[in-house]
Amino acid sequence: KAGVTQTPRYLIKTRGQQVTLSCSPISGHRSVSWYQQTPGQGLQFLFEYFSETQRNKGNFPGRFSGRQFSNSRSEMNVSTLELGDSALYLCASSLTLGAKDTQYFGPGTRLTVL
Amino acid sequence: SQQGEEDPQALSIQEGENATMNCSYKTSINNLQWYRQNSGRGLVHLILIRSNEREKHSGRLRVTLDTSKKSSSLLITASRAADTASYFCAYLTGSARQLTFGSGTQLTVLP
């Protein structure tokens, strides 16, 4: 099976712009989660989708949003970019995010905001 | 979000030695997973242990879980230079649909 894929792998934007990141989960996985990783804050949860519904959201401002499509692919959007949004954004997929389910991560999208 | 804690923050050992990393958390959990990350890349899943399990093995990896102490440990035996990476624990709680990550341990294995 192909792993979790994320596009693009690298992105450079300027403050005030918006960005859309894409994630394709492992075939058959219906849960997709997004995380932000920074040196200062570590790995922080953004949101989780299952069957096109957002089931949980982390403590991030409304500028961060996401969605999931019927084929389980997911996108996250960040509007009005700030310097502090520079980070590695990781997507993860699992069957259902249940107790037995491993969460598999993609390679990440490195976002740099200038 | 509340993070788990890992210790040590950094560990440097010689090839062939064993490496032990510890993780502590504060809530009841459904499972706990360990991941490896090489230099800012994606997370590679190592092992999952469920809350009703006490120990699991996978190759050179041994994970223990003590739910009474809310702690887990990852042991890597006979370490290799290729094991150099950051290691994270992450736990899934019953109500939250999210993994909460520990702060990570940076392991350096010297040849």
Image (cartoon, helix red, strand yellow):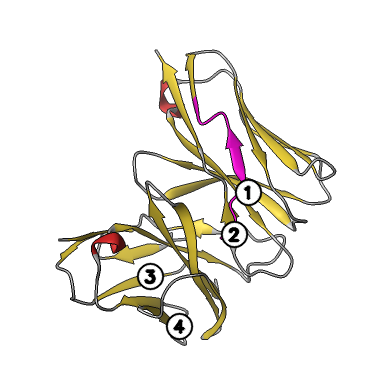
Residue stretch rendered in magenta on the structure: B1-10
Same chain assignment for discs 1 and 2: yes
- For the residues bearing labels 4 and 1, Cβ distance under 8 angstroms: no
Same chain assignment for discs 2 and 4: no
- Quadrant in the picture for the C terminus of chain B: top left
Type of the residue with mark 2: Leu
- Residue A69 against residue A81 in the figure, above or below: below
Could you say which quadrant of the image residue A10 lies in? bottom left
Q: Nearer the viewer, mark 2 or mark 3?
A: 2
From the top left corner, tell me how far across and down residue A22 is, in percent.
33, 72
The residue labelled by disc 2 is B99
What is the secondary structure assignment of the residue under circle 4?
A: loop
The residue labelled by disc 3 is A23
Type of the residue with mark 4: Asn
- For the residues bearing labels 1 and 2, Cβ distance under 8 angstroms: yes
Left/right of residue A97 with respect to residue B82 in the rendered view: right
The residue labelled by disc 1 is B33
Label 3 CA crowd tier, 10 Å (few <14, some 14–19, many 20+): many
- Residue A70 against residue A97 in the figure, above or below: below
Label 2 CA crowd tier, 10 Å (few <14, some 14–19, many 20+): many
Q: Which mark is residue A71?
A: 4
Mark 3 vs mark 4, CA separation in Å = 11 Å
Mark 2 vs mark 3, CA separation in Å = 18 Å
> Which chain contains the residue that carries disc 2?
B
